[in-house]
Amino acid sequence: MSAPRRPMNPSGLERYYVLTKGRSGPGGSASSLDVATLIVSRTAPAPGLQHEHEEILRRCRDPLSAAELGAHLGLPFNILAVLLTDLLEAGHVEARDPIPAHNAGRGPDLALLEEVLSGLQRL
């Protein structure tokens, strides 16, 4: 006689708990991550890394936003942020603001917006 099977958890919450080792959100300097943050690999995947960490390093050879990365991996942002925290603290990835700091707060470049509008009107 076999033991009764446990029902599968369709929400994936058990998987997320295992992936993050029970952590619910990023801490430290990674708490400033948002969906527009660009992630870039600084190292190649190494033996012994968690599968998801390896996949992040492979996909981020070129800059990729956290939103795009989450979509590729099928992970919610808070779970991805925990995994990125691990990689940031180990120096495997770099997080970049999507807007350079010297332009922050200035607003959009009006000349560029006018050129785009002009180009759209010509279509």
Image: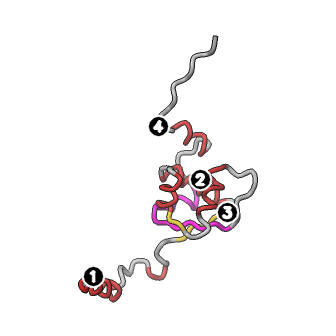
Instruction: Classify 10 Å Cα crowding around label 1: few (below 14), some (14-19), many (20 and above).
Output: few
Q: Is residue 18 magenta?
A: no
Instruction: Give the labeled residue for mark 3.
Output: 92
Say whether disc 4 or disc 2 marks the residue closer to the N-terminus: 4
Asked whether 1 or 68 is in front, the reply is 1
Residue depicted at x 23% and y 84%:
121
Do the CB atoms of the residues marked 2 and 3 lie less than 8 Å apart? no
Say whether disc 2 or disc 1 marks the residue closer to the N-terminus: 2
Outermost residue toward the right in this view: 47
Locate residue 119, reporting x and y percent. 29, 85
Q: CA distance from mark 4 to mark 2?
A: 19 Å
Q: Nearer the viewer, mark 4 or mark 2?
A: 4
Locate residue 33, reporting x and y percent. 51, 61
Do the CB atoms of the residues marked 2 and 1 lie less than 8 Å apart? no
Disc number placed over residue 83 in the picture, else none: 2
Do the CB atoms of the residues marked 4 and 1 lie less than 8 Å apart? no
Q: CA distance from mark 2 to mark 3?
A: 11 Å
Outermost residue toward the front in this view: 123
Q: CA distance from mark 4 to mark 1?
A: 44 Å
Specify start and end residues of the magenta stretch as a single range: 27-42
Quadrant location, the C terminus:
bottom left
Amino acid beneath label 1: Leu
Q: Is residue 51 left or right of residue 109?
A: right
Asked whether 34 or 119 is in front, the reply is 119
Disc number placed over residue 120 in the picture, else none: 1
Amino acid beneath label 2: Leu
Vertical side of 29 occupied by 16: above or below:
above
Mark 3 residue element = loop
Q: CA distance from mark 3 to mark 1?
A: 41 Å
Say whether disc 4 or disc 3 marks the residue closer to the N-terminus: 4
Q: Nearer the viewer, mark 4 or mark 1?
A: 1
Q: Nearer the viewer, mark 4 or mark 3?
A: 4
